[in-house]
Amino acid sequence: MTFTLPQAWLLLLPLGLFLWRHGRRPGPPMVLRWALLVLGVGALAGPELRLANAGSDVAVVVDRSRSMPLDVDRVAQELISLVESQRRPGDRVGVITYGREARVESPLSEVGRFGGFTRPVDAEASDLSAALDARARSFPLNARAGCSWCPTGGPRARMLGARRGGWRREASRWTTGRCPVRSPRWTWPSCPWTCPPPSPCASPSSSPAVVQATSAVTGTVRLERDGKVLVKGRSTSSPAPTCLPLRDLLEEPGLVRYRLTVEVPGDGVPENDVGVGVLRVEGPPRVLLLTSQPSGTLAKALSATGMEVDVKAPFHLSLEALDGVGVVVLENVDANALGETGLNALADYVDQAGGGLVMTGGRSSFGEGGYRRSPVEPLLPVSLEMREEQRRASVAMSVLMDSSCSMGMQVPDGRTKMELAAEGVTAALTLLNANDEASVHMVDTEPHESSR
């Protein structure tokens, strides 16, 4: 028998002294009081009784493919060390790594420490099934109950459990969209085709398809890209899911539509024998230069670097116009040239999409260009606040606002002309200081002074 907190037995000294001095009172006999004291302190000490050959087997399964972070080896070694530090008598720890194939780095052992990864694996693929099989083989048939950890991360993560006398895999499917389902002969699993993330030009892309039949049959598999047949051949499938690795080399950026068809003679329901997927191909990042000087020094300097530079006159931006753009350069561009929707789109492009923004100086840039209190201001590394010491003279401003019935008309965003005018007057008045003067007049058939 062992105790998890043997220091608790030291409490017997002060508690026993207290009971010897003050325990001679009517009530339970002293023998019973001493017995209760010993049992209470023993419970605090946390007694443990371990039988012979008791313990747990823990297999750590590590994915070392290229899809994992660069520091996966360091993180995995730290976790393995943590597991080994918690190992108690009878517990065994083993390490299995895998990429395209599985390797047993360290067999199950009750002693010793893991010294690091020494067996190389092919990092171009991840065969989780082979790793699970190797993990199952590392335990004898009469293996003690245990568990395992698999740091694959992301949507491919799996929760794995060991049970006494055998293994059980707990794996959940993942989906990327609706897929055709069910037929008497052919059925698609929850996701027959998982397209990869956006792929760069001139690089091979891989998108495996999974086909499942209700019986062992042989059919014709045809893969089309935008209507053009890429692959056509015979394939045999069993009731178990069959993985068809599909690869393609894409040269041009844009959206590519794939269509996978499986034809089997005598199939009564051919409607679900088709899987479709869309892949977005990314070209090299572009630099969008908005300038009123398309042949200026900045445009020539950017083009001389070899980057793909798209020089345009300032216009109302949108997220669609910024698709495929890596950096937006504003060369002395007034905020009014971008429009309110363009300023919001540019802010979302930088803040949400991670795009780059460069703003050069000039009389139409920063505060003087109207970016003060705009959605773009928080993105700039400088303050656009008008400092008091920068003022050279006081300003007198008079605002005339049309208050006729025509100002009640709505603009495309749902606001009225009067609301837009009021917002403009408010923005102008906030730029004034205590030494400035301003007046506001409402004008219909004649002017009416509103404030001074």
Image (cartoon, grey):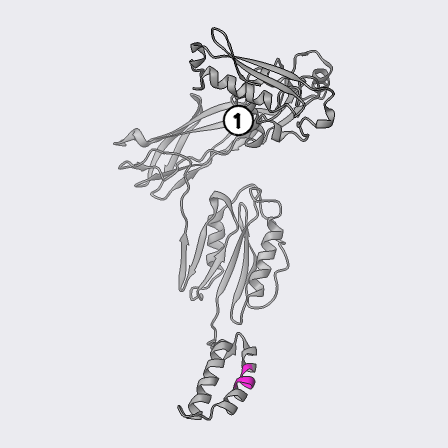
Task: Establish if 389 lies above or below 114.
Answer: above
Q: In this rendering, is residue 66 above or below 226?
A: below
Q: Position of residue 123 (x, y in %)?
A: 58, 44
Residue under the image location 48 percent in, 73 percent down? 53
Q: Tag 1's secondary structure?
A: strand
Q: Split into 4 quadrants, where in the image is the C terminus?
A: top right
Camera sees residue 328 = yes
Residue 2: x %, y % from top left: 52, 78
- Image check: 228 left or right of 250? left
Q: Which residue is mark 1?
A: 281
Neighbours of disc 1 within 10 Å: few (<14), some (14-19), many (20+): many
| Towards the viewer: 51 or 98 | 51
Please identify the residue farthest to the top as the structure is shown: 445
Relative to 224, say whether 449 is above or below.
above
The magenta region covers 11-15
Q: Residue 129, percent across and down?
A: 46, 49
